[in-house]
Amino acid sequence: MTQVTTISRYLSSMTTTSKSAFTQPAQTWNSRFSKDGYVFGTEPNEWLRRHASVWHPGSRILCVADGEGRNSVWLAKQGHQVEAFDISEVGVSKARRLAQENQVVVDFAVAGCDDFAWKQDQYDGVVAIFVQFADPDLRARLFENMVRSLKPEGALMLVGYTPKQLEYGTGGPSVLSHLYTQDLLRKAFGDLNIRVLEEYETELAEGDGHKGRSAVIGLVAMRG
């Protein structure tokens, strides 16, 4: 069997698994988060850490699909007023425990992206870190809600995998339509002032979930 054939079969298998997972997101993420430890670690994402100075202390920030809380808890430790939601009850339970251990307050909710009580013009910041379970239709609704919920002059921050990540297989979905490109993000957030849009490769060390050489793209955009 050739290497190309092996890779092709691997990607086909992973695509089937990923599509199955996307049809039952709560069940899938409850299962993943039920394991000991934190799937993506307890430290914040590097893109978030690098660009968090875009917000003044005390900013009201929403973390989308925040999982086990590593990013929301870190933002709360920086002095922000943080809200966060995730579809997984197990993940949110662990996020609450992480916040308690770090002696910070985060307003957590269990909700999916379509079920969350989105509020218009409410947040100084909206954060979406590797939120790539969303198919194109759900993603469009999610991105619209993220923009709508920003206050004027609020900042949106997003990071995700690019199609090149399929070559690495070190995290993220193996479904091409769920991955991000510059063109996709420019179209999705065209009404915002895009301050930073960067594709880069890095060695991720975010628990066992994101580990190794990775192809990612990061965005920072402001509502005018």
Image (cartoon, rainbow, N blue to C red):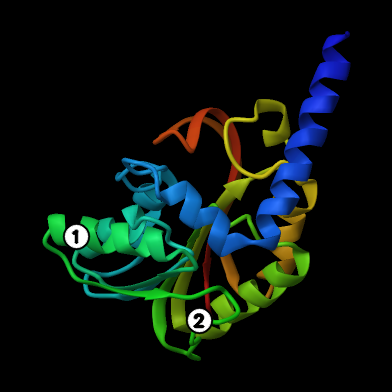
Q: Residue at x 58, y 30 (%)?
A: 170
Is the N terminus in the top left, top right, bottom left or bottom right quadrant? top right
Q: Position of residue 34 (x, y in %)?
A: 40, 49
Q: Position of residue 5 (x, y in %)?
A: 88, 18
Which mark identifies residue 116? Answer: 2
Give the residue type that dot 1 points to: Lys
Q: Which residue is at a point 54% across and 73% down the rendered structure image?
A: 112
Q: Is residue 120 left or right of residue 180?
A: left
**Front residue of 21 and 45:** 21
Q: Is residue 105 above or below residue 157?
A: below
Give left or right: position of 29 versus 74: right
Amino acid carrying mark 2 in the image: Phe
- Left or right: 176 in relation to 201: right
- Of the image marks 1 and 2, the number of the one nearer the N terminus: 1
The spot of residue 79 in percent (x, y) is 18, 67
Considering every residue shown, the one lying at the far left of the view is 103
> Where 199 falls versus 133 (above or below)?
above
Q: Are marks 1 and 2 in contact (CB under 8 Å)?
A: no
Residue furthest out toward the top: 1
